[in-house]
Amino acid sequence: MNHSSLVTRHSSLVTAAAAAVAIATAGAAAAQEPAPAGEGPKPSMFLVGVGKAGSVDHNPVRTFSGRVLSPETVAVVAQVAGEVKEVCFEEGALLKKGDVLYRIDPVKYEAAAASARAQVAQAEASADYARKTFDRATALFEKKVASADDLDSATSGKAAAEAALDAAKAALVAAEDNLAHCTVVAPVDGKVGLNAATAGNYVTTASGPLCTIVRQDPVRVAFAPGSRDYLSFFGGEKGLRELFDVRVRLADGSAYDGEGAVEFVGNAVNAATDTMPVYARFANADGLLVPGATVKVEVKAKEAKRYVSLPLTAVVHDGDKDFVWMVGENNMPVRRDVVTGPSTATYQTILSGLEEGEEVIVRGTHKVIPNVPVEPVAL
């Protein structure tokens, strides 16, 4: 290539570059100029997908964290003081009400009971003599042989003797009760824990629990639905009892083979968590539901119910309220508040606020701006 051709090519490149700079500068200047009055930028049209609300038969399920509780937990304490002579159970054993747990040295209590019985016998003899004395004094007074003072004395002696007899009988009851408590028995059915008083220990009423018995069958499972769910979803205690089944999953995720029954509902909402405590009763013959354990509670409707349904993407959450966008006149978005029900991985049910067949925005809800028209596309 000769020298003149190179010069000509270089000149062309410079001219083209200068033209490009001039066009860019002119474009920037034009962009900075204000638009003529009355010809401002028009609202953008946002492409959204619209569809009709459908319906679905759904067995709603609510899942809660639950805690296994024993309906009866008894800390067994000594009712009398004395040396433990015998321990009659094995730790961890299942006991029946009335099974013997401990035998406490009964010697002094047997003596006290024998003395009390003797006191009763003596008091009965004194009372019998006082009654006879009263009867004689009454007869003599009626014959005007005894004075009124003699009758008053006999009346007083009779009352004192009968009072002494009552006191002796009461002392005997207490003595025999103490003697009976030398044999400590299980007050309820259940599983016994650690033994805190081996043979040879001296125990008193202040020694604390000797052992603890926890009822294992049946058990309670406590869970706490929110107050909103409790009313709108379950329909209160009556609906929860009659319309829903209660089942649990164990800590390893396996389903417990047994259905619970709502035993009772708490008498007040927990103000700190806004939840209502519910207690369900479960049979537990195999002992898999251990008191104190955490389980997953599944509350499922007994019968399927027909709900208005929408794709999950159609429902927008705004604080405490849920709503959907509908397309109004001139393609303007219109907000419609709804009350949502149970949902799955694919759809959201609507309890109120929307009817089946109504058309809503189901895709692109994040693009919607109030008072800015949209461009709906049927899906």
Image (cartoon, grey):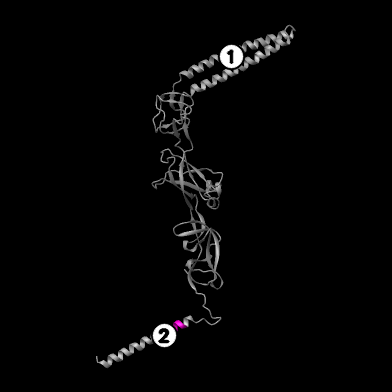
> What stretch of residues is rendered in magenta?
25-29
Q: Is residue 175 left or right of residue 12?
A: right
Rendered residue at 62%/13% (across/down): 127
> Is 253 covered by the magenta stretch?
no
Amino acid found under the numbered disc labelled 1: Ala
The reply to whether residue 354 is visible in this rendering is no
Determine contact: label 1, label 2, CB under 8 Å. no
SS state under label 1:
helix
Q: Where is 190 relative to 306, above or below?
A: above
- Is 26 magenta? The answer is yes
Name the disc covering residue 23, or none: 2
Do we see residue 167 in this rendering?
yes
Other residues around mark 1 within 10 Å, as few (<14) / some (14–19) / many (≥20) = many
Cα distance in 3D space between marks 1 and 2: 130 Å
Q: Main secondary structure of the magenta part?
A: helix
The residue closer to the viewer here, 299 or 106, is 106
Q: Earlier in the sequence, mark 1 or mark 2?
A: 2
Measured from the top left, where is residue 251 in percent x and y? 40, 46
Q: Which mark is residue 123?
A: 1
Where residue 194 sits in the image (x, y, percent)? Answer: 40, 33
Residue 144 placement: quadrant: top right
In the displayed structure, 204 sits above or below 361; it is: above
